[in-house]
Amino acid sequence: MDSHITGRTALVTGSASGLMRGVCVSLGRRGYAIAANYRSPRTHADETVRAVRAVGARVQAFPADVSNPDEASALIAAVHLAFGSIDVLVCGAGPMLVKDFAATTLDEYRSLMDSNMGSVFSCVKAALPHMRERHFGRIITFGMLGSDVTMGWRHLSVYAAAKAAVVAFTRSLALEEGPNGITCNVVNIGDIRDKDADREAVLQRRDYRNPLMRPGSWEDVGDAVAYLASDEASFVTGSVLAVNGGWQGFLAEFSRWP
């Protein structure tokens, strides 16, 4: 995909580091102005700003804990004021908790659901009126391996449930908002351990457990997001795009059974 976008703004939540920083860079390469969200303190948000500026894109960092509905709403308002529009909303915020359910507390459950599903709800709720008014929008959320079929995972019960909820929400939203010119899609990310490695680096490896025998990179995820945000994907909505090197997680789970 080589198309270059100008005059459109993408808000990426949770983009102070990791794969979402890569998403910012991938979209910036294609000409999007980037609103990079981070949760205070600022920590590594300046590194994201520098990375996006290095590819020649306009970028500004915005603080907000998007698991808080009031802060999510204020974030949308601030980005809209600064850039004049929010054309693409990439809901990347959401921590993982690796823990057996028996050891998971009620506070941890609430925090994980608020950070993953709640943040998507609040950001979409605030951004939707602006997109509807312009009759254009791209909403992109994130699941995990198997969340489109509600697959269970050891040590990830609450996280897996939250991601399955995100997929169901996004698919439902696609049905409602298609007539308003808004597409809604999910990227299911595979097992990407080194979130700072680019594609050139990972192509040198041939020792991984997926069919492509190499790890994924931030560019693999970023390019998938860029496609779903593009005009080329204007007929794609309610879809789940797996970026996992062909690895089927359920096979790995079965292989661990006694």
Image (cartoon, rainbow, N blue to C red):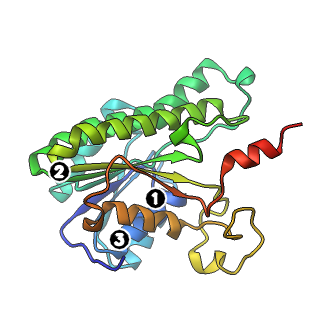
Residue 121 found in image quarter: top left
- Looking at the image, residue 28 sits to the left or right of residue 125; the answer is right
Compute the Cα span from label 1 to label 2. Answer: 32 Å
- Amino acid type indicated by mark 3: Gly
- Looking at the image, residue 205 sits to the left or right of residue 159; the answer is right
Q: Which residue is depicted at the point 48% across and 37% down? A: 116
Q: Which residue is mark 2?
A: 181
Residue 12's place in the image compared with 2, above or below, is: above
- Amino acid type indicated by mark 2: Gly
Q: Within 10 angstroms of label 2, few (less than 14), some, or many (20 or more) residues?
A: some
Q: Which residue is depicted at the point 65% across and 55% down? A: 191
Q: Position of residue 76 (x, y in %)?
A: 25, 44
Total count of labels: 3
Q: Which residue is mark 1?
A: 45
- Looking at the image, residue 215 sits to the left or right of residue 42; the answer is right
Does any portion of residue 245 appear in the rendered image? yes
Q: Within 10 angstroms of label 1, few (less than 14), some, or many (20 or more) residues?
A: many
Compute the Cα span from label 2 to label 3. Answer: 23 Å
Q: Identify the mark nearer the N-term, 1 or 3.
A: 3
Q: Which residue is depicted at the point 15% across and 56% down? A: 84
What kind of element bears circle 3?
A: helix
Compute the Cα span from label 1 to label 3. Answer: 15 Å
What kind of element bears circle 2?
A: loop
Nearest-to-viewer mark from 2 and 3: 2
Q: Position of residue 106 (x, y in %)?
A: 60, 18
Q: Position of residue 127 (x, y in %)?
A: 23, 43
Does any portion of residue 130 appear in the rendered image? no
Residue 99 found in image quarter: top right
Nearest-to-viewer mark from 1 and 2: 2
Q: Which residue is mark 3?
A: 28
Residue 215's place in the image compared with 183, above or below, is: below
